[in-house]
Image (tube, rainbow, N blue to C red):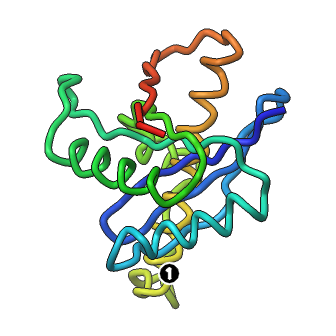
Amino acid sequence: MTTLLGVDLGERRIGVAIGSDDGAPARPLVTLLRAKRTDGDAAAFGRLVSEHGVDEIVVGLPYEASGAEGPQAELTRRWAEAMTTLVAVPMAFRDERLTSHLAEARLGPMKRGRSGGPPSRAQRDAYRARVDREAAAIILQDELDARAGVPSAKPRPSVTLETDR
């Protein structure tokens, strides 16, 4: 059995999901706050890898709507490349287009604030963290389905990150 982490990388937060190739669905795990430097992110991932016996990390790659790689995809690739030198597990990429939208649809609307007013900052932050975790689970489930040969309504190609080890 192979245990994988799914990653939805954002500017401020990192949604993380966990799953395995045993047929069970991927599930949201945790939302991490981005560290100021990649080695801070790597330390957090090192703990997750060790704690959960992770064999591989699947990172959502934010393609543009046209299918081209834009500036965000380049930043994500650089982050993943830096992580591979610090975290000793292979990394792969998975198209993450529309995953946040799908996650929001799964979770439903954000709860209203007190007395039906707008949500507080804490409520907004908690909701965004849940969306990030759910998006990571969608990314990881897409990868698990592709590996199992399960047809997808929206195929998202997987790209392996080549590293010199």
Query: Which picture quadrant has residue 65?
Result: top left
Say which of 72 and 83 sits in front.
83
The residue tagged with tag 1: helix, strand or loop? helix
Tell whether 163 sits left or right of 20: left
Q: How crowded is mark 1: few (under 14 residues within 10 Å), some or many (20 or more)?
A: some
Residue shown at 85%/29% (left/top)?
A: 22
Write the residue at 39% across / 81% down.
118
Query: Height in image: 75 above or below 158?
Result: below
Q: How many labels does the image show?
A: 1
- Asked if residue 49 is positioned above or below residue 71 in the image, the reply reads below
Residue drawn 43% across and 19% down? Answer: 157
Q: In this view, does 153 lie to the left or right of 20?
A: left
Vertical position of residue 34 compared to residue 4: above or below: below
Q: Mark 1 points at which residue?
A: 123
Q: Position of residue 151 (x, y in %)?
A: 61, 9
Quadrant including the N terminus:
top right
Q: Which amino acid does the dot numbered 1 rest on?
A: Gln
- The spot of residue 123 in percent (x, y) is 50, 81
Image coordinates of residue 17 in percent, x first then y, are 64, 52
Residue in the picture at 36% in, 48% down: 81
- The single residue placed furthest to the front in the displayed view is 165
Q: Nearer the viewer, residue 72 or 25?
A: 72
Q: Judge left or right: residue 62 versus residue 132.
A: left
